[in-house]
Image (cartoon, rainbow, N blue to C red):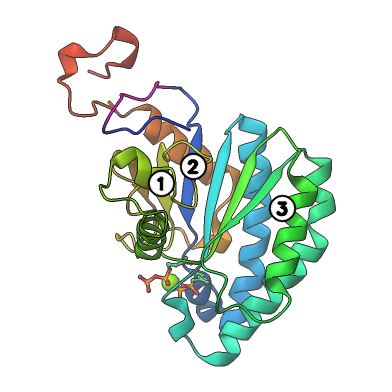
Amino acid sequence: MFGSSTQTVPEAKRVPRHVAIIMDGNGRWAKKRFLPRVAGHKRGFEAVRETVKACSELGVEFLTLFAFSTENWRRPADEVSFLMEMFLRALENEVVRLGRNNIRLKVIGSRERFPAGIAERIAAAEASTAANTGLTLTIAADYGGRWDVMQAANQLLAEGCTELTEDALSSRLSMAYAPEPDLFIRTGGEVRISNFLLWQLAYTELHFTDLLWPDFGPAALDQAISSYQSRERRFGRTSEQLPDSERRS
Ligand code: IPE
Ligand code: IPE
Ligand code: MG
């Protein structure tokens, strides 16, 4: 298990170990071109491929992409089914490519509302990439930060736990296999978390860009990482307490 940023100060690395992204703006990208919203989701998928490749090449260890939130079920039924279909097809078609690139796939979120067949495909895709030792790519689908904290707390209750601790709770979160994100990116211009990784973002550096997700790629990722590298990560300490290599002013 990885240390918690509120209990021990994480090791600072130049390249963020864990990047978490809210991929927003597909609909607006399409609207600007007088295309249906789903055309934006299709192009967004290309941006996913490019970003996965770029992170892998940079030596990022964990990349987590928010693909569908617990609140996205509120969208029109035809958009939801298009997204489900796209997810299903990606699970079928991309696994070979992930294997070639030594990428381990994980999917987090509640699986209860997915159409039949998706849960099995997820399990198969995770199993067939489980031994890969490169980038761990996590797709958050039917995911919500509150859902995650609640399911962790419920697991503890079911185990008969009578007192909660940070360690106990965080070890039952759906991403207990990864360190907390170092860098959070949200595209699309909105400045909010939209129920993404609420617990894990406690000390994450936040980066917001107006670029719409289909326009995101290696150059925008480099910009986000440069911004990250210019930040002083104090985790509650004063600047003077930091080692010289971590001081930014
Ligand atoms: C993000 O793009 C993709 C999903 C939430 C699935 P949006 O579809 O939210 O695009 P905008 O925000 O409407 O432009
Ligand atoms: C956040 O985007 C969720 C995903 C990218 C999957 P939304 O477009 O759903 O967020 P809001 O509704 O603008 O907050
Ligand atoms: Mg949106």
Location of residue 108 with respect to 233 vertically, above or below: below
Whether residue 15 is visible, yes or no, is yes
User: What separation in Å lies between label 1 and label 3 (alpha carbons)?
Assistant: 24 Å
Label 2 crowd (10 A; few <14 / some 14-19 / many >=20): many
Q: Quadrant of ligand 3?
A: bottom left
User: What separation in Å lies between label 2 and label 1 (alpha carbons)?
Assistant: 6 Å
Q: Number of labelled discs?
A: 3
**Point 49% across, 52% down: residue:** 174
User: What separation in Å lies between label 3 and label 2 (alpha carbons)?
Assistant: 20 Å
Magenta stretch holds residue 9: yes
| Label 2: which secondary element | strand
Question: What is the x, y in percent for residue 139?
Answer: 58, 57
Q: Nearer the viewer, mark 1 or mark 3?
A: 3
* 145 horizontally vs 113: left or right: left
Amino acid beneath label 1: Phe
Label 3 crowd (10 A; few <14 / some 14-19 / many >=20): some
Q: Residue furthest front?
A: 160
Amino acid beneath label 3: Glu
**Point 25% across, 47% down: residue:** 163
* 32 horizontally vs 199: left or right: right
Disc 3 designates what residue?
A: 126
Label 1 crowd (10 A; few <14 / some 14-19 / many >=20): many
Amino acid beneath label 2: Val
The reply to whether the residue tagged 2 has its Cβ within 8 angstroms of ligand 2 is no
Which of pointers 1 and 3 lies earlier in the amino acid sequence? 3
- Nearer to us in this view, 222 or 17: 17
Check whether the beta carbons of the residues at disc 2 and disc 1 lie within 8 A of each other.
Answer: yes
Location of residue 149 with respect to 5 vertically, above or below: below
Disc 2 designates what residue?
A: 19
Magenta region = 7-12
Q: Quadrant of residue 13?
A: top left
